Image (cartoon, rainbow, N blue to C red):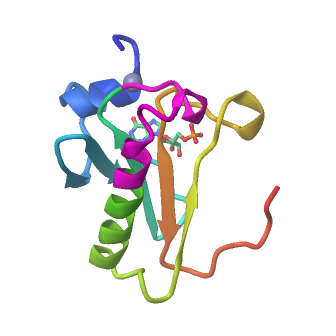
Amino acid sequence: MEDCLFCKIVKGEVPSTKVYEDDEILAFKDVNPMAPVHILVVPKKHYNDITEITEENADIIKKIILAINKIAKEQGIADKGYRIINNCKEEAGQTVKHLHFHLLGGKKLGDKMC
Ligand code: 5GP
Ligand code: ZN
């Protein structure tokens, strides 16, 4: 997607602090961290949001969760705990329309769900 910020980060056209990469996934630090560890995990392939995940392509979600668990270990937050957030579309506050998961940890997180 030409005008997509995270596609540009994937292509290296916009700089980011990478923490994990494989053939299909990139993870990088959020530019405006809400916790000591705040990492964005994205599929390299563009999906607008999680509603585009289907029986045919859902394997990417499994791979993302496995990558998140690996990153959490590397970041030293696996034992104490962490939160994975996906904002889907406007009312959930999705601002970047490229599917992404927030990995948050490194402190006691708030207990508010909404
Ligand atoms: P959303 O609100 O769509 O769930 O999350 C988008 C996230 O992208 C926000 O937490 C925001 O701080 C982050 N973000 C926005 N622009 C950039 C950028 O240029 N680089 C990085 N690393 N993160 C960004
Ligand atoms: Zn994109």
Number of numbered discs present?
A: 0
Residue 88 lies in the magenta stretch: no
Q: Residue furthest top?
A: 2
Note whether 2 is above or below 87 in the view shown: above
Q: Is residue 30 left or right of residue 49?
A: left
Q: Is residue 78 left or right of residue 21?
A: right
Residue 79 rendering spot, x and y as whole percentages: 44, 88
Residue 57 rendering spot, x and y as whole percentages: 41, 34
Residue 77 rendering spot, x and y as whole percentages: 42, 80
State which region is magenta.
46-63
36 or 57: nearer the eye? 57
Quarter of the image for residue 51 reads top right
Note whether 104 is above or below 79 in the view shown: above
Which residue is located at x 50 percent, y 53 percent? Answer: 102
Which residue is located at x 21 percent, y 25 percent? Answer: 13
Residue 30 rendering spot, x and y as whole percentages: 42, 50
Which residue is located at x 63 percent, y 42 percent? Answer: 87
7 or 106: nearer the eye? 7
Q: Is residue 19 left or right of residue 37?
A: left
Q: Residue furthest bottom?
A: 79
Note whether 33 is above or below 42 in the view shown: below
Residue 49 lies in the magenta stretch: yes
Which residue is located at x 43 percent, y 31 percent? Answer: 56
Note whether 7 is above or below 22 in the view shown: above
State the quadrant of the C terminus. bottom right
15 or 67: nearer the eye? 67
State the quadrant of the N terminus. top left
